[in-house]
Image (cartoon, grey):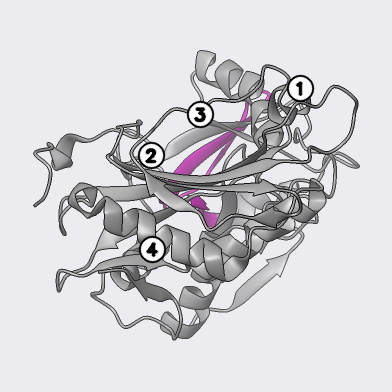
Amino acid sequence: MSKNIDWANLGFAYIQTDNRYVSNYKDGAWDEGTITTDAMVTISECAGVLQYAQTCFEGLKAYTTEDGKIVCFRPDLNAKRLADSCRRLEMPVFPEDRFVEAVVKTVQANADYVPPYGSGATLYIRPYMFGSNPVIGVKPADEYQFRIFVTPVGPYFKGGAKPMTIRVSDYDRAAPRGTGNIKAGANYAMSLQMIVDAHKEGFEENMYLDPATRTKVEETGGANFIFITKDGKFVTPKSDSILPSITRRSLMVVAEKYLGMTVEHREVRFEELKDFAECGLCGTAAVISPVGKVVNHGEEICFPSGMDEMGPVTKKLYDTLTGIQMGRIEAPEGWIKTIQ
């Protein structure tokens, strides 16, 4: 039975649910893992995650489809990305097949928290891993814990599809080149000062440029950019330091295969922005959030098709992808994992 929650008015905030998944790594192997009702994590004051931030995480969602099924969107890609993050941080890889299995078990155990179809809400899924044993020397931990919790959420950005105003950051992307392509807690923590500063100045987000030349667009603190040209092409920045967004990868397929658009995944120079018709931020939490204006030290760059509402092409992309996720539109093979 569905929980008594005001689904239509949910914010993007943590709500504790009944169950979560836990698996421990010790003596070179992962245990079988289990579903538990205990939401507390107890670790040593000297745990590797606390001393050297040895942790990584993922984010994905479960949905109720139009025909009443509970599904998850491309969890195999989250499993692969977590594995890549683990390798980069010298952490043991949680097997990709077990990752998907753990997601399924966790959502099934919290099925009453999956928002109903049409509510505008979803069940956010947060898998994460951290070094759990005491580590005082600078070295990888020997023991790790992999966990998954879920929480029902509403829209990530308040105001729905209202276009945002963002600024060009004076700071470089927090992650060193080559590490922006992992989801690590330390990478995100390093961007907190910049996002808080942006909010104080009235901007919703930061646009980061490449640290070497500061002439090419990279990403924001938590999302990839997409652009629509005036002749209808889909353009998204390419860089080794950009997080490989699963939503962005999916939108590239939607643009080409469903909407018949030309797709360009390439370096995007900042000077090109004035020539684009639409701009958006894409990611798991928000799917697509429209950008109406980019401000670079007083210079305003406005996107003509997105100043007052989501641009028409961006809206088609959003509607098509969410239609696939919600079961209204047939999905490419392997994109939808049926949970219940």
Labels 2 & 1 near each other (Cβ < 8 A): no
Determine which of the numbered discs, if any, sits on residue 156 in the image.
2
Residue at disc 2, secondary structure: loop
Q: Which residue is mark 3?
A: 41
User: In this rendering, does residue 13 appear at all?
Assistant: yes
Residue name at image x 12 percent, y 43 percent: 3
Q: Quadrant of residue 337?
A: bottom left
The foreground one among 195 and 17 is 17
Decide which of tag 2 and tag 1 comes sooner along the chain: 1
Q: Quadrant of residue 159?
A: top left
Labels 4 & 3 near each other (Cβ < 8 A): no
- The image position of residue 38, as x and y in percent, is 38, 34
How far separated are the C-alphas under marks 4 and 3?
22 Å
Residue at disc 4, secondary structure: helix
Q: Amino acid at mark 1?
A: Gln
Above or below residue 335? Residue 217 is above
Q: Amino acid at mark 2?
A: Tyr
Determine which of the numbered discs, if any, sits on residue 51 in the image.
1
The foreground one among 233 and 323 is 323
How far separated are the C-alphas under marks 4 and 2?
23 Å
How far separated are the C-alphas under marks 3 and 2?
26 Å
Determine which of the numbered discs, if any, sits on residue 104 in the image.
4
Q: Amino acid at mark 3?
A: Val
The residue range painted magenta reads 277-305
- The image position of residue 312, as x and y in percent, is 36, 61
Mark toward the viewer: 2 or 1: 1
Residue name at image x 71 percent, y 41 percent: 143
User: In this rendering, does residue 280 appear at all?
Assistant: no
How far separated are the C-alphas under marks 4 and 1?
32 Å
**Mark 2, residues whose alpha carbon is within 10 Å: few (<14), some, or many (≥20)?**
some
Decide which of tag 1 and tag 3 comes sooner along the chain: 3
How far separated are the C-alphas under marks 1 and 3?
16 Å
